[in-house]
Amino acid sequence: MQAEVNAALLLWLPALVLALATLNVIGRGGRAWKPVAVAALVLVLLAPLTVPSSDSTAAVLLMWEASIAAGPLVLGLVLIVFTGEVPVGRLPSAWRLVGYVLVLLSVWTLVVREPTFASVEAWNRFATALLAGVVSVSASLAVLHLAYIPRRRSRTSPLLVAAVTSAAALRVRGVEGSLAIGMVPELAGMLLGACLALLVVLAVVWVFERRMPEPEPLPPPSPEALARAAHIISMRPRGVLADE
Amino acid sequence: MNDVMRRTRAVLLLLAVASGPVLLLVLADGSRPSSDAVHLGFANTVFAGFMVTSVMLILTLLAYGDSRDRPAAPVVGILVLVAVGFLLGLRVLEAGGHLSGNGSAQAQFFSDLVDIAPAVLGLALSVLVGLLSAASGLRRLTLPEADGLTPPESIS
């Protein structure tokens, strides 16, 4: 019983608080949510040291393992992005090489390295899903740029490189049959369940929106309000959309 | 844009989305699970996906009811989600799924979540990697080009 209480207090409760605090940090929550989010994240990450081993702590160990590959990958890509002619947050161009090295290091980690903390099965699932996901997302974005956004046609090469590199990494790494054949339907099932819940909630919102009364007509604007509006319009800069 | 061109673009986009799963199935090597096991995994994750998303959407419904002055919306939403979840759970049980290898429904539910967590984590990260790759292609854009705007002629 003590183990369950420990897990509830030191892992599941902080995980719930972390979700709530993150929503508040992203949204319009007060400043106090930031330290709460950080404290909850620290408690969740330390769970394998504070809570007896279980499926839940295995998930946290996977996060440790994933961060070894994901940290350099995300940092490397951020360095590559921000060493260009970006309007904000520009970095010295020397950092671009560091970015490429970090990305290559993380690809090597995903393809060759054996897991230290997480189980081999969980690590294989993570790495396979990540590489296959990058193939799908990058290919989709490349097609979107090529087919739907003419002014971005010349910008698709990094997306194609990402898709081809991930596919090659997946080929070199190898895909275990039992893992792949099981994972694809599982992810499809997860997506289907999520879409079903979304559909139910959309139906509820639609019913309530349909029953919303028509808004009452506004009174006609006063001459002062019209004059003020005309003044504001005359002060606007005349920008012209290039695509129109 | 004519219909043929529009359809071709849509098919290309669908193929691109499906490229990851298709690649996995093509590269799969070695032993393969039985169709019963695949069916079981699918049924269990439909239920797990529905439950996890429902919890998040109930929070959204609470915010919706508050902002649109419709206090009954979250209550109705929860009732409908519980009813659909109950029917879905029954259907999964009928399909011989939910309690495979676990003593209770809760244990199976958390086991499903932990099983699928690595793949979900990997997919979430892949979206971030894809977006950053797209951003690295845009890094030479000047600000007006990025916004699709030409500079204003004059500011009066």
Image: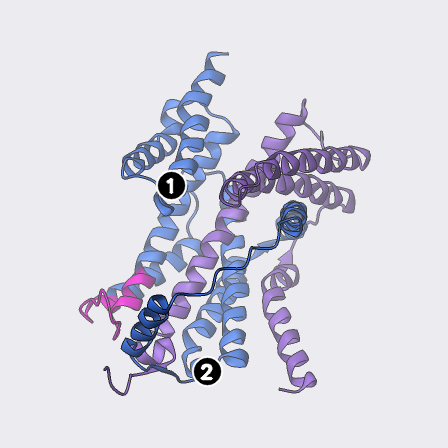
- Image check: B127 left or right of B79? left
Query: Which chain has been coloured purple in this picture?
Result: B
Residue A239 in the image: above or below residue B120: below
Which chain contains the residue that carries disc 1?
A
Q: Nearer the viewer, residue A102 or B29?
A: A102
Mark nearer the N terminus (2 vs 1): 1
Q: According to the image, label 1 marks what residue?
A: A24
Q: Residue at x 34, y 51 (%)?
A: A71
Instruction: Give residue A153's mark.
Output: 2
Instruction: Give residue B64's mark.
Output: none
Q: Nearer the viewer, residue B141 or A219?
A: A219
Residue A202 in the image: above or below residue B135: above
* Image colour assigned to chain A: blue
Q: Which amino acid lies under the numbered mark 2 shown in the image of this protein?
A: Arg
Taking the image as drawn, is residue A102 in sight? yes
Taking the image as drawn, is residue A127 in sight? no
Question: Which label sits in the foreground, 2 or 1?
Answer: 1
Q: Which amino acid lies under the numbered mark 1 shown in the image of this protein?
A: Asn
Question: Which stretch is magenta?
Answer: A76-97
- Image check: A76 left or right of B110? left
Circle 1 — which element? Answer: helix
- Image check: A215 left or right of A189? left
Please provide percent x and percent y for residue A234. Answer: 30, 78
Residue A87 forms part of the magenta stretch: yes
- Image check: B57 left or right of A72? right
Q: Which coloring applies here? A: by chain
Q: Residue at x 33, y 72 (%)?
A: A227
User: Which of the 4 image quadrants contains residue B70?
Assistant: top right
